[in-house]
Image (spheres, helix red, strand yellow):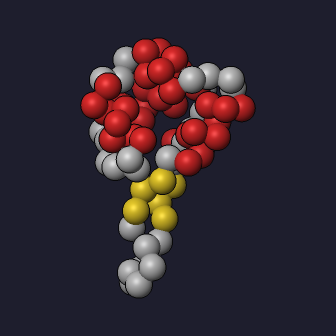
Amino acid sequence: MAISYNKLWKLLVDKKLSKDDMRKAADIAPNTMTRLCRDEEVTLAVLHNICKILKVDIGDIMEFMQVAGEER
């Protein structure tokens, strides 16, 4: 399964926040932000901080995607 943070990016647009604004508010390191932009794994603590500052649930910012050819 692959991770997608597309929901997060759409939410930032809806809230009129830049990625940099979110990064600073959630105290996320630049290299962790790069991992998010590449749809790579980050720690649960990072996801919790993002949810806290955006006042949303984890399912509102990420989802697991089925990869073609991958069994469940």
Observer-nearest of 37 and 45: 37
Dividing the picture into quadrants, the one containing residue 46 is top left
Q: Residue at x 43, y 15 (%)?
A: 24
Residue in the image at 71% along x and 32% along y: 14
- Note whether 53 is above or below 56 in the view shown: above
Q: Residue furthest right?
A: 14
- Please give the name of the residue rendered at 57% of the width and 23% of the height, measured from the top-left corner: 18
Residue 12 is left or right of residue 68, and the answer is right
* In the rendered image, the vertical position of residue 40 relative to residue 21, given as above or below: below
How many discs mark residues in the rendered view?
0
From this view, report whether residue 20 is shown above or below residue 32: above
Q: Residue at x 56, y 48 (%)?
A: 6
Q: Locate residue 37, reporting x and y percent.
A: 42, 41
Horizontally, residue 18 falls left or right of residue 69, namely right
Instruction: Find residue 5 and report its horizontal and vertical position in percent.
Output: 50, 47
Quarter of the image with the N terminus in it: bottom left
Q: Position of residue 48 (x, y in %)?
A: 43, 32
Is residue 41 rendered to the left or right of residue 37?
left
Q: Is residue 59 visible?
A: no
In the image: residue 41, left or right of residue 59: left
Q: Quadrant of the C terminus?
A: bottom left
Can I make out residue 46 in this image? yes
